[in-house]
Amino acid sequence: MRIGVVVFPGSNCDHDACYAVSHNLGHQAEYIWHDSTSLGNVDAVILPGGFSYGDYLRCGAIAKFSPVMGAVRKFAQDGGLVLGICNGFQVLVECGLLPGALLRNRDLKFVCRTVTLRVETTNTPFTSGAQRGQLLRIPVAHGEGCYYADDRTLAELKAEDRVVLRYVDNPNGSLDDIAGICSAGRNVMGLMPHPERAADPLMGSTDGRVILESMLTSLATHTFSPPQALIA
Amino acid sequence: MSLTPSELDKVRSILGREPNQTETGIFTVMWSEHCSYKSSRLHLKKLPTKGDRVLVGPGENAGIIDIGASESGERYAVAFKIESHNHPSFIEPFQGAATGVGGILRDIFTMGARPIAVMDAIRFGPLDDPECGDRNRRILEGVVSGIAHYGNCFGVPTVGGETVFEACYNGNPLVNVFALGVFRVDDIFFGRASGIGNPVIYVGAKTGRDGIHGASMASAEFTEESKQKRPNVQVGDPFMEKLLLEACLEAMRTGAIVGIQDMGAAGLTCSTCEMGSRAGTGVEIDLALVPQRETGMSPYDIMLSESQERMLLVADKGREGEVFAVFRKWGLDAVTIGAVTGDGKLRVKDHGRVVAEIPNRELADEAPLYDRPHNVAPYRPAPMAAPEFASHNLEADLLALVGSGDLCSKRWIWQQYDYMVRTNTIAGPGGDAAIVRIKETGQSIAMSLDGNARYCALSPREGARLMVAECCRNLATVGATPVAATNNLNFGNPERPEIMAQLVDAIEGMSEACRHFETPITGGNVSLYNETLGEAIWPTPVMGIVGLMKTAPPVTIPFKAEGRTVLLLGGLGAADLTRFGGTQYAKVVLKKMWGLPPALDLDYEKRVQSAIRQVVNEGFAESAHDLSDGGLAVALAECTVNGIGAAIEISADLRPELALFHEGPSRILVSTADPQAVEQIARIHGVDAVRLGVTMKERLRIDLRSVTLVDCPVGRLREVWANALESQLALQHV
């Protein structure tokens, strides 16, 4: 599979996502520069962590207007798999591809540590290889990771089984312990934790692999195919 | 801030005339203590700087060592250095610390290396100081969030460091930042303005009035007026620095760059004259071409500005376009502001009119050199004789120690740093040494920062030797071989002989130990005039040592399983009352300081380090932890934080306080399933290995000659250790 990793000015986990996909999982990964209006010939897209455009104004707020996000939006609307990690989650929320908002952490401080997550649904292409209720040890590293949504949105997320991951030990005050959600079409997922940091035994945990591997397997088994119209 | 009369005479003789105001400003910053090392240079020459692996030693932006080849045969290197940002961090903690990180990162990537690790040695006044506690807490919180802000956004992991509290830092906190980067040996760049006629190009952020005379400020004592120096502190933008990093590395790959240097202390002045001096050329620039973010800036302002995130580079004439294209891609300013000339002079013009003309070499390399008087005993803030003391409850003493500022968990601090970005961190903060893997070569770099001002206050020479030994011991304990070092010398006013004597003794002690451990010093930083209202900090040299090791799962501090043998490699050590006065026990429990630091036998220390390295690398250590501050009992407590305790029996013929808490060096705690193997290795290296006891569930019990001194649930130790810093910080909310 070919996974495109978007590089915004200020992205800093782009390298890590590429390394996990290529070295740890043995697939192809390529960078997509932010001013590109096409995603090229990729099977899925990762929006990596970092501080896109310096996180000026609000995390992800400027990335929303970058040329590449037009292509990502189209790719997602046509059913392509898009995984937003950390800052990538913030960008997806700003773009309206996922609902809600990510606020300053409860204690107003950046937090970097390994947390325990619970898989709440396996009915997504990003968790299809996991078990419901499975606990994953994956690092977080963010200052604005406190998930928030209004009552109606939260009810909708729950009713539609779109809360994908919850914190067992909530590090940031997220509403209802939400760590990751997916879109109504289930092909777009955003999460604050970093699965790419838990893909190599030397990093202390390989629990993040199930998310990346589920995505790759979903592509291979055509459960979720890249939108044909976009393939060059 | 100004030149002394004799320095001004020297300027007159170099120029053959009176300097104008801009030239005086240029000489003042370049000949400041911070930029010229005029008080320390004479003694820094005593440090060992050469070694098989040293590719670049002192004098460049960072030292560089060879770390070996990748599988495909390409040779790789790491660039590393430590630098202080003490004065700015006192005036404006957040920005002072943030720009400290920014400055050292530029020193690394200006040489072509990609930064992959940062560590910080930070020192403050006590958080519960009755008079300064509020301010100390505010400075600590500001410094930590400044480091986090810059490093996290830039995308470099902050993998370790140390945090120390002493009253001598009440008016003068220390912020020393270490950074390390990796690259291919073939990709090293230097700050040289070579090739007459080549364009001189300014890249990065626009120049403003911030930070003017920052370097000179850092070369003076603090007075009441210092609080008004906030305009001298620079403001950092880590996003801009991240762009600058990517753009510079990409521009270097075009092959069109001849030389490059960051604009740090003394900004445009320092980068132009140093690049010219190193290449033996002249540099001519026109300030009207410099991108500016304010109007009405004078030549003096522009030359002395320390605005952040700027670089100066020299490109091959005719290939500027390739360089400009890269910087345009990253949305950064890149402007030709002048050219390399053959006359050896820094010629500064403003709209074509010459406003300064100074020979580069004399400006950059012929700063005054002072042999400051130091033929007195170093100033000692403590008596030699030990006071009377007797503990009533050693378990309570142990709890007080693990909950004290220096020894408690620093998780509250390092959890604010992204210590994992770039997925190389094999061992992050909280261990004896940090370990970062090098993906390209398949091996890892271990690194440790250490200082002990308490020891150095009692004896700068012995304290400096102990510091080097401890730093190397930290590396050995994780299985690494120390190979090179960088140092940060934080001292008071060198014009006072008793302070200058501290500096000279510390350098000589450090020099002796670095030779012994074969860790040449490849660069560093000297920060003098760390005084406020006439009160100097204790002599505080800080050492950063880098070691090499194979990439493997790390051996860490906590005990891993019950029923394992606990050994003290190196033996129980020697102690006496005089050499107990610099310990954490004396500080925390007795609230006193006296005597001398612990005795160190360099030969024995080196053998212990070789032994632990072999024990770890051959897989016999399930856990390993070197003894340092707090001695044996504190080290044992630190080994129990994951919930496994131990039953320990000490046979030493020492009084209980000394047996538990003396800080004799050359000792490492190991837990192992194969004690014979560890003892065998110890014999081979000619060092002691004492069986202390066995790991067990839930309790730490320590007996001395069959008398139980400590018997404590490990959960209780952990609770005190883990929560101490946060509860001290929370004092302000009471």
Image: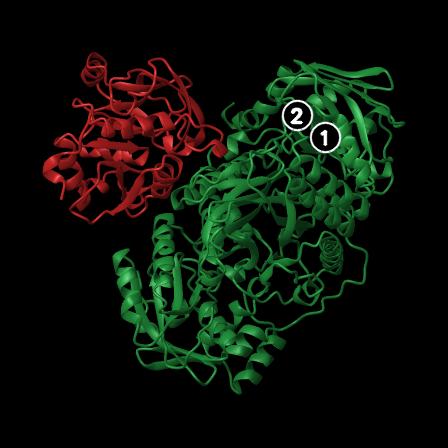
- Asked whether, in this view, residue A96 is left or right of residue B162, the answer is left
Q: In the rendered structure, which amino acid carries the disc numbered 1?
A: Leu
Image quadrant in which you'd find residue B444: top right
**Residue B199 is at least partly visible in this image:** yes
Q: Nearer the viewer, residue B304 or B543?
A: B543
Chain letter for the red part:
A
Picture disc at residue B639: 2
**Residue B630 spot, x, y in % from top left:** 72, 31
In the displayed structure, A190 sits above or below B422; it is: above
- Asked whether, in this view, residue B672 is left or right of residue B11, the answer is right
- Residue ID at (45%, 68%): B271
- Residue ID at (56%, 69%): B31
Q: What residue would you read off at disc 1?
A: B669
Number of labels in the image equals 2
Q: Nearer the viewer, residue B409 or B582?
A: B409
**Residue B74 spot, x, y in % from top left:** 48, 57
In the displayed structure, A129 sits above or below B467; it is: above
Q: Chain of mark 2?
A: B
Q: In the rendered structure, are the residues bearing label 1 and label 2 in contact, judged by CB atoms less than 8 Å apart?
A: yes
For mark 2, does the 10 Å Cα neighbourhood hold few (<14), some (14 to 19), or many (20 or more) residues?
A: many
**Residue B496 spot, x, y in % from top left:** 72, 60
Labels 1 and 2 share a subunit: yes
- Asked whether, in this view, residue B398 is left or right of residue A160, the answer is right
- Residue ID at (28%, 17%): A122
Colour scheme in use? by chain
Assign a secondary structure to mark 2: helix
**Residue B536 is at least partly visible in this image:** no
Q: Residue furthest right?
A: B653
Q: Chain of mark 1?
A: B
- Residue ID at (18%, 38%): A72
Q: Nearer the viewer, residue B197 or A224?
A: A224
